[in-house]
Image: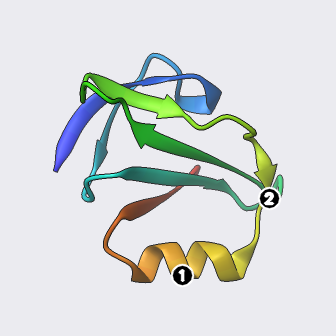
Amino acid sequence: MKMLRCVGGPLDGKDTISRFPKGFLVVDKPAGRCWLYDIAADESGWILREGYPQAWDRQKSEEAAEGSDYDVLVIP
């Protein structure tokens, strides 16, 4: 687990924990949008991936949740 600061997107400037090494997907189900954060090359923070936000895809979110590379977080 790593707690690092987010850059970009809805979590910009917030310290966030991911249980998985590559990053995490943030889902806003009511709005139907999602954002993907990757770990920075120097592991100093979580960086919003270019091209996000995107439309939320339930199947892709479930696949990410079942994998071991990306965590899935839901905006309350």
Among the two numbered marks 2 and 1 on one chain, the one whose residue lies closer to the N terminus: 2
63 relative to 12, above or below: below
On the image, the x and y values in percent for residue 68 come to: 31, 73
Q: Residue at x 71, y 77 (%)?
A: 58
Q: Which one is nearer the viewer's eye here, 12 or 69? A: 69
On the image, the x and y values in percent for residue 33 come to: 78, 52
Please name the residue that numbered disc 2 is placed on. Answer: 30
Q: Which one is nearer the viewer's eye here, 64 or 12? A: 64
Q: CA distance from mark 2 to mark 1?
A: 20 Å
Of helix, strand and loop, which one carries label 2?
loop
Q: Amino acid at mark 2?
A: Pro
Left or right of residue 1, residue 6 in this image: right
In this picture the colour scheme is rainbow
Please name the residue that numbered disc 1 is placed on. Answer: 63
Q: Residue at x 40, y 61 (%)?
A: 70
Label placed on residue 16: none
Of helix, strand and loop, which one carries label 1?
helix
Left or right of residue 51, residue 17 in this image: left
Tally of marks: 2
State the image quarter where residue 6 is shown.
top left
Q: Residue at x 26, y 22 (%)?
A: 44
Badge 2: residue crowd in 10 Å (few <14, some 14–19, many ≥20):
few
On the image, the x and y values in percent for residue 50 come to: 67, 34
On the image, the x and y values in percent for residue 66 come to: 42, 83
Q: Amino acid at mark 1?
A: Glu
State the image quarter where residue 3 is shown.
top left
21 relative to 6, above or below: below
Q: Which one is nearer the viewer's eye here, 6 or 44? A: 44
Badge 1: residue crowd in 10 Å (few <14, some 14–19, many ≥20):
few
29 relative to 18, above or below: below
